Image (spheres, helix red, strand yellow):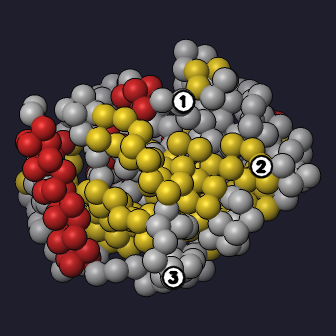
Amino acid sequence: MDETHIMDKQRRRILEGSLALGVLGTFGCSAEKDTVAAATKTEWGKTRDGEFVDIFTLKNATGVEARIINYGGIVVSLKVPDRTGAMGDIVAGFDSFDDYLKPPPYFGALIGRYGNRIGGAHFSLNGVEYKLPKNDGENTLHGGLRGFDKRVWSAKEISPQALELTYVSKDGEEGFPGTLTATVRYTVTDANELKIEYLAATDKDTVVNLTHHGYFNLAGDGDILSHEAMINADRFTPIDKGLIPTGDLKSVAGTPFDFRTAKAIGSRIEEKDEQLAFGRGYDHNWVLNRTGAGLELAARVTDPRSGRIMEVWTTEPGLQFYTGNFLDGSLKGKGKTYTRRSAFCMETQHFPDSPNKPSFPTTLLKPSDRYQTTTVYKFSK
Ligand code: BGC
């Protein structure tokens, strides 16, 4: 692809981005600091199509810092203080852009158009059957072969603490109907939060489930089994051996899935339990206890070693808690080897396979509606 073509492509994306904001409107709350200064932007790499990718540094007053690229909206690093005030990077990631082009564990990425699994790689909408690519056995995982995590997003620097990314997904892309315009705003707030606001609009009925796939290790190294987790959920969605929900909402009471009071992640992970066997550990969606539509506490994870605490607040009904069971030591980055259970994910979302499960909260988006969700990862010590 020649230079002019690439420039045209980039210009088109920027134009699509500004049009998108016209379509979507803007986020309700503004960035932390309403200044003209922007996030620090540096060129970081080039895709195989020759598209340039930038890295943006968002930093708050106390030094909490997120570095984010406009490829997949990936949070490459996230530095937060430990109990002594020392900053440490608490997300899994790689050192160079090219490492992110290899087959993914989705480290730190935005996931769409449909986060998590769609069973049998198909769904029906308005009497039409949509066939999707199979990229996880018989199922579709995280938006298909080339989901939102593998796309270059247009970037708008809102302030030194906020970045807005827009991606326009074409009608039929990865098998999904409708042109979907998605805008995600990342903000590092002065309350030591990484706030993620999602907006989307479509021109045809479609299904949407956007999430963020950060892999956290609050100690910065080692495994996460001694981290203590609380998940604010009385029920979870049990799965079959392909990790597709059966459709039931099962009580966590008396099971290894009961995190209603904090316990070490590793305390029951090796128990003989069919659900744990299917997930090779925790890889399930919890049905969050909710009282309304606003931001509510979904989970709290504490690392006794570093003293770091992470809370997850969300407007979403579900939380995929994944304990890095498929990490096998083959990936390396930041001087570490990503071994089994060296990180955990807390993906806020609608439930997996909702397009095929009419009893689950709907993931249908109509042209007359706006998709709008917010998730906050809040750090303290
Ligand atoms: C899924 C896991 C998967 C991981 C990486 C998680 O959201 O639930 O099964 O291995 O993403 O793809």
Q: Quadrant of the N terminus?
A: top left
Q: Which residue is mark 2?
A: 87
Question: Toward the viewer: 180 or 296?
Answer: 180
Q: Residues within 10 Å of mark 2 (few under 14, many from 20)?
A: some
Q: CA distance from mark 1 to mark 2?
A: 18 Å
Give the structural element (helix, strand or loop) at label 1: loop
Q: Can you see residue 93?
A: yes
| Residue 74 point in image, percent of width and height | 45, 46
Q: Can you see residue 357?
A: no
Q: Name above or below for residue 32 compared with residue 336.
A: below
Q: Quadrant of residue 337?
A: top right
Q: Which residue is mark 1?
A: 95
Q: Name above or below for residue 369 compared with residue 62.
A: below
Q: Amino acid at mark 2?
A: Met
Q: Which residue is mark 3?
A: 34
| Disc with the residue nearer the chain's start (3 vs 1) | 3
Q: Amino acid at mark 3?
A: Asp
Q: Amino acid at mark 1?
A: Asp
Residue at 20% from the left image edge and 77% from the top image edge: 23
Question: Toward the viewer: 47 or 358?
Answer: 47
